[in-house]
Image: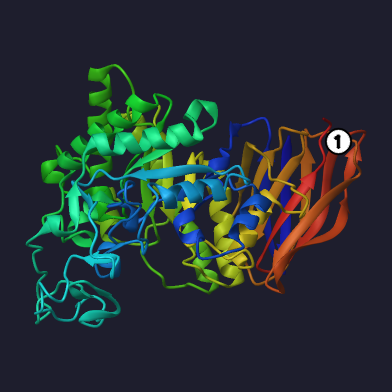
Amino acid sequence: MVLSCTAIAQTTKLSLSVNVAAKQHPIDPNIYGMAGFAAGSYPDFPAYAQEIKLPNIRWGGDATTRYNWQVDASNAGADWFFIGGNGQTNPTPSGQVDAMINTYKPAGSNPLITIPIIPYIYSNSYSPSTNLYLCSFNQKNYPNQGLDPNIGWTIFFPFITTVDGECGMGWDTTGSYQLLDNNIYYNHIDNAPSIQQQWVKHLVGKFGKGWKGGIHYFQLDNEPYGWGNTHVDVMPDGAQYNTIVNLGQEYATAVKEVDKSALIFGPSDFLDAGWIGDTTQQDGLMAGQYYLKEFAQYDKENGKRSLDYFDEHYYPIFLNGQGTPQEIQTTRWLWDPTYNTGTWVEQYFFHGPFMLIPRFKSWINKYYPGTKLSLSEFSLTYDDPTIYGALTQADALGIFGREGLDFADEWYVPAPTDPVAYAYRLYRNYDGKGGQYGDTWVDSTSQDQTQLVVYGAERSKDGALTMVIINKTANPIKGVVHVANFETTSDWAEIYSYTGDNLTSIVQQPNIPLTKTGNLVNGFTSTFPAFSASTVAIPGTK
């Protein structure tokens, strides 16, 4: 099938083309995942997850790095005054994680579980019954603390008082250097593969093995190259990538000894520095390249695969443009070979534009072919409550499908009534009746993706042709859509639009009459509103 659109806004003419016979590939539903850790703040989110059939839910983030499943508690690190505990006198082992898994079972959401590989996890001992929390830099043992120079927060956190006083951020009184934790075992124990292996056994015993529809996905910690910052109390010197690799291999092996069908994600590191590491200690390679190379060699030596997904985290470098039309262009970092913003990564390491997904795929193809690609934590919208946030998210999801990304989780999880939530609905429930965007990508190109873009896909269950068409401009664009090589017995195409005029619903527009020769569709004409995203569906013949 060939579909083309000539769109006219004033004197502008743009062409869109879709060729169903070219570049077909499956669209993995896991690109529509979200972060369960963040979703917990919305009581109505589980119902939304069921509505859009949320494919996966992630247990991850900084606060999971030191999670001890045996006491169901972690240490929040520098994100929250190095406080650990869960406020319970008799915690249930793996209670939080088990509850998350059960909460999203009705939606069919497969969990991605973070396995701590850091050398220390939160303590299995408790403070006196009068207090259920401990912190690394407490007032009693570290009285001489100052303001955190990065955030300017109070010297001590006044709302939680531990047995040893209030909790600080661990900076000296001048705010010039981080204090050393002189007793890590005050609130931590040594981590070990055997501890995590017992947790995997618990999860498998309760929910089943991956190949039996149980727990499929396990992640090797969270942003390990940042341990020397977020988890500076236990890792003041951080960890270089040779250590990160060795720990990853050890714990991946431990997980797969319990369930050989488990799928392992790593290194799950952060934007820029986490992708790069220290090239002088990585055979001259960037961290991601080195990680893939070392895992490939390890797996070759052991005769089996221990890394299944090359996984990284991604946030746009700049927030300028948030809440404005410029925000929509940030999706170009994901793919565009002409979008060079001059960042230090582009200049000194990439020697050109980010082209994030194609670049990571090239690393995989060179160093460990067959590994899938994941962005288990990303956000391009930063919880933007405007139409621009919704269009940015919708554009990113279309790009994920086009570029063949295998897995993705949005970190800034939207409330079900937020604009970004409607971006997901355009793909997962555009008609309010479970209507979904297709699962097989068909070649779709745009003359100018900065203005009008189409993402086309066939829906396997009924053969429908679905398209998400995004107008990124301030003007309505009237498009004449030419369709070739697609047959239907219907005389109509359905269209559902989301615009800034109504941020609380996707509105079904009048059906679009098709021009046809017999059952062969020739085209249709429609006007795409300013700053809008529309899902168009032409019934198939199945």
Q: Looking at the picture, how far across and down is residue 32, in whole percent?
A: 56, 48
Q: 388 left or right of 191?
A: right
Asked where in the image residue 308 lies, by quadrant, the reply is top left
Q: Looking at the picture, how far across and down is residue 445, in whole percent?
A: 61, 45
- Residue depicted at x 51% and y 42%: 403
Q: How many marks?
A: 1
Does 221 sit above or below residue 160? above
Depth order, front residue of 16/237 = 237
- Residue depicted at x 50% and y 26%: 211
Which image quadrant: the C terminus?
Answer: top right
Does 353 sit above or below residue 156? above
- Residue depicted at x 24% and y 59%: 126
Tag 1's secondary structure?
A: loop
Q: 492 left or right of 24?
A: right
Q: Which residue is the site of mark 1?
A: 488
Q: Looking at the picture, how far across and down is residue 374, in whole percent?
A: 43, 42
Depth order, front residue of 61/408 = 61
Does 186 sit above or below residue 531? above
Residue type at numbered disc 1: Thr
Asked where in the image residue 320 lies, by quadrant, the reply is bottom left
Does 293 sit above or below residue 481? above
Residue at the limit of the structure toward the top, as seen here: 303
Asked if residue 264 can be seen in this view, the reply is no
- Residue depicted at x 48% and y 54%: 36
Asked where in the image residue 488 lies, by quadrant, the reply is top right
